[in-house]
Image: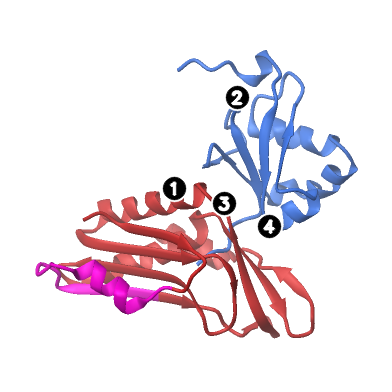
Chain colours: A red, B blue
Amino acid sequence: MGPTIRVQTAPFDLTAELAALTAGRTDIGGIGSFIGTVRDEHAGKSITALTLEHYPGMTERALEQIAATAWTRWPLLGCTLIHRVGRMVPGEAIVLVLTASAHRAAALDATAFLIDWLKTKAPFWKHESYADGTSAWVEANAEDEDKANQW
Amino acid sequence: MNQAPISADSAPLRILYFAWLRERVGTSEETLTPPAGVATVADLLAWIPSVDERHGRAFAQSALLRCAVNQTFARPDTPIHPGDEIAFFPPVTGG
C-alpha cells in the first residue's frame, strides 16, 4: 500500500491511523511515529492559539513528493502523513508521521527524515496568538533548514 | 509542449499570496498583467513592486520571499508562461 496523505482541520485519531497502517499486515517489524503538538510558549511569549495556513493543492503535492522520496530511500511497508490546518490551541496535535518497515532502523530514520523535510519543503505557515493580545507569523528557523539538508 | 514565453506576448498571470505577504498585499489572489519582457520569476519579482504603493511595501524585502510556479517550488530563473499559477510567500514553517 502506498502512503496515506491528508491535510485536514479535524483532529486525527492515532489509534485509528495505526490500525489502518497495519491492517492485514504481518510483514511489519517496526513502526516509527512522530506527533507534533502545539506548545504554550515561544521566545518567552505565552501562546493562546496557533493557526496553520497552507496552499491547497500544492500542499498535497509537496507531501506526496516527500513521502515518495522516503519510499525510495528506505524499505517502507507503509507511511502516513497527516497535517492539520486552521486554529489549534496548546496541547493539540498538529502533525502525524507514521512509518512501517520490517526493521526498526528504516522506520525510525524515515520518520525523522519525513518530519525534517515536511518542516522545510511543504507550504504551511504558522501564525501565533499570544496571551498579551498580540500575534505574529512564525519565522523560519535556519536550524530546521540545516536538519533537512542533512538527509 | 511548446508554450510561448510571456515575453513574446504579455498576458495576465494568476498570482497567489500567503501568510504575511497576503496580509501586506491585501489579497490572497489577483490577476496581474506584466509588461512584455517579464519572462522569469526574478523578472516578475523585479516588476511587482512597481504595480502600486501597496505592492511596493509588501515586496520591499523580496529577498526573503519564496515562489512556486504551478504548485512547484521555483527559483529566480524559473520561466513563467501565460496561464501559469504563480505563488509568492515567506519561507514555510509547518510541522
A36 with respect to B52 (left or right)? left
Residue A106 belongs to the span the image colors magenta: no
For residue A89, what is the image quadrant? bottom right
Is A106 rendered above or below residue A122? below
Residues at discs 1 and 3 both on one chain: yes
Image coordinates of residue A141 in percent, x first then y, are: 59, 66
Q: Amino acid at mark 1?
A: Arg
Distance between the Cα atoms at labels 2 and 1? 21 Å
Residue nearest the viewer, comparing B9 with B42:
B9
Is B31 rendered above or below residue A10? above
Mark 1 belongs to chain: A
Q: Secondary structure at mark 4?
A: helix
Residue nearest the viewer, comparing B55 with B30:
B30
Q: Amino acid at mark 4?
A: Ala
Residue nearest the viewer, comparing A34 with A26:
A26
Q: Which residue is mark 2?
A: B81
Magenta residues? A12-34
For residue A128, what is the image quadrant? bottom right
Mark 4 belongs to chain: B
Disc 3: CA contacts within 10 A as few (<14), some (14-19) or many (>=20): some
Precedes in sequence: disc 1 or disc 3:
3
Distance between the Cα atoms at labels 3 and 4? 10 Å
Q: Which residue is mark 3?
A: A55
Q: Amino acid at mark 3?
A: Tyr
Image coordinates of residue B35 in percent, x first then y, are: 77, 22
Q: Which residue is mark 4?
A: B19
Q: Which mark is residue A61?
A: 1
Give the residue at x 73% y 58%.
B20
